[in-house]
Image: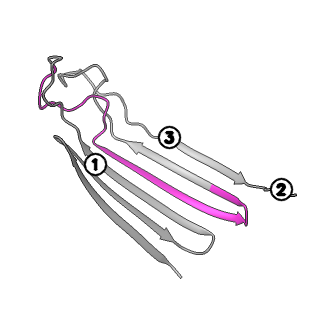
Amino acid sequence: MILLRGSIQILKIQRNTVWRYLTTLILSKTINLNLSYTYVKAEIGSNSLGFTKGKDMPGVPQQSIIANANYKFLSAGNLNINHVWKESTYNMADFDNNGPSNPPSFQPIFLLIMNLVLLAK
């Protein structure tokens, strides 16, 4: 039996908007896939530091995607592979958003093998 669960969250925090889509696809009792997409529009608001109001907040990517696959191979063991992609963004100190180029996007891949053994007396 294949089961698909999903949810959408939209948050408005002051001037910033966060839109997130989460979904889980359960292929069997031992295999499931997860996908998360996030869109963030973070703008500089009123401030006393002199930063330009209305510009994008540096260091905050507008889009990111996380894909995850999990395989439960034992009752206490899991194999999990995870890929993260985050859009490039302005340098952390570039509050005017006029840097010559954006740092590259962030794209690590993680592999995790867990085997939990609980000993009880």
Mark 3 Cα shell of 10 Å, populated few (<14), some (14-19), many (≥20): few
Q: Work out whether mark 1 precedes mark 2 in sequence or the reverse, and give the earlier one.
A: 1
Amino acid at the residue labelled 2: Leu
Residue shown at 47% from the left, 77% from the top: 3
Quadrant of res 61:
top left
Residues at marks 1 and 2, CA–CA distance in whole angstroms: 44 Å
Question: What residue did someone put label 3 on?
Answer: 108
Question: What residue did someone put label 1 on?
Answer: 39
Residue shown at 43% from the left, 51% from the top: 66
Query: Between tags 2 and 3, which lies in front?
Result: 2
Q: Position of residue 111 (x, y in %)?
A: 61, 48
Residue shown at 84% from the left, 58% from the top: 120
Q: How many marks?
A: 3
Mark 1 Cα shell of 10 Å, populated few (<14), some (14-19), many (≥20): some
Residues at marks 3 and 1, CA–CA distance in whole angstroms: 19 Å
Label drawn at residue 63? none
Quarter placement of the C terminus: bottom right
Q: Tags 1 and 2 in contact by the CB under 8 Å rule? A: no
Residues in magenta, as a range: 51-79
